[in-house]
Image (tube, rainbow, N blue to C red):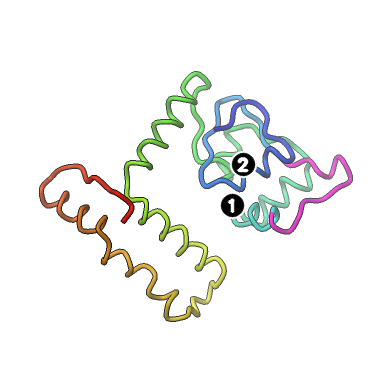
């Protein structure tokens, strides 16, 4: 949840999160060039993966703070909402995510990290089998039953 300024380390922290929702009027950037410093390798990796090389360079070399709409356009944030709706929208999304299968979320994030680390998809057998592990879980069976019964699943993380 971003309201107001997320500059320098604040923007780097936002980049490190899974999702970013900003209030209209927010401004984001990493103006390290104004201070004569640089960002670290991990922060650079996250920024480039989030917005791409060109946009990462624009953010760093220009030293500018982007308005919320430009941040949305380049993928620095996922959504921009009116300031008075920021908490409502953010907590609603968090509740929606929390109501879904936690093992599915965990494996999707792990699979995504594998793909980013090994774009060639030269995976070990265990890595390649990771997405299939969900079919042996209680949550999968609950989700499947709930779908057939046309009801909301009750996931337990097992």
**Position of 112 relative to 82 (above/below):** below
Q: How crowded is mark 1: few (under 14 residues within 10 Å), some or many (20 or more)?
A: some
Q: How crowded is mark 2: few (under 14 residues within 10 Å), some or many (20 or more)?
A: many
Quadrant of residue 13 within the rendered picture:
top right
**Position of 43 relative to 113 (above/below):** above
Quadrant of residue 9 within the rendered picture:
top right
Q: Does the magenta stretch include residue 82?
A: no
Horizontally, is 144 left or right of 46 in the view? left
**Residue 94, how many percent across, how many down?**
42, 37
Quadrant of residue 69 within the rendered picture:
top right
Q: Residue at (62%, 46%) from the top-left corner?
A: 15
**Residue 149, how many percent across, how many down?**
10, 48
Q: Residue at (35%, 38%) from the top-left corner?
A: 96
Question: Cα distance, mark 2 to mark 1?
Answer: 11 Å
Q: Residue furthest right?
A: 36
Q: State which quarter of the image contains the C terminus.
A: bottom left
**Residue 40, how many percent across, how many down?**
76, 55
What numbered label is drawn on residue 50? Answer: 1
Range of residues picked out in magenta: 29-42
Q: Which residue lies under the disc numbered 2?
A: 14
Q: State which quarter of the image contains the N terminus.
A: top right
**Position of 134 relative to 74 (above/below):** below
Horizontally, is 72 left or right of 101 in the view? right
**Label 2: which secondary element:** helix
- Between tags 2 and 1, which lies in front? 2
């Amino acid at each position: 949840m971003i309201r107001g300024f997320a500059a320098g380390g604040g923007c780097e922290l936002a980049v490190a999160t899974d999702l970013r929702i900003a209030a209209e009027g927010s401004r984001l950037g990493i103006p390290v060039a104004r201070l004569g410093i640089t960002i670290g390798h991990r922060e650079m990796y996250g920024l480039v993966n989030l917005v791409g090389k060109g946009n990462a360079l624009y953010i760093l070399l220009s030293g500018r703070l982007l308005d919320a709409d430009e941040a949305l356009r380049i993928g620095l944030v996922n959504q921009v909402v009116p300031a008075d709706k920021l908490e409502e929208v953010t907590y609603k999304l968090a509740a929606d995510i929390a109501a879904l299968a936690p093992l599915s979320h965990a494996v999707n994030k792990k699979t995504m990290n594998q793909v980013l680390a090994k774009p060639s998809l030269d995976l070990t057998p265990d890595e390649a089998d990771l997405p299939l592990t969900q079919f042996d879980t209680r949550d999968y069976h609950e989700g499947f039953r709930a779908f057939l019964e046309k009801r909301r699943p009750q996931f337990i993380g097992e």
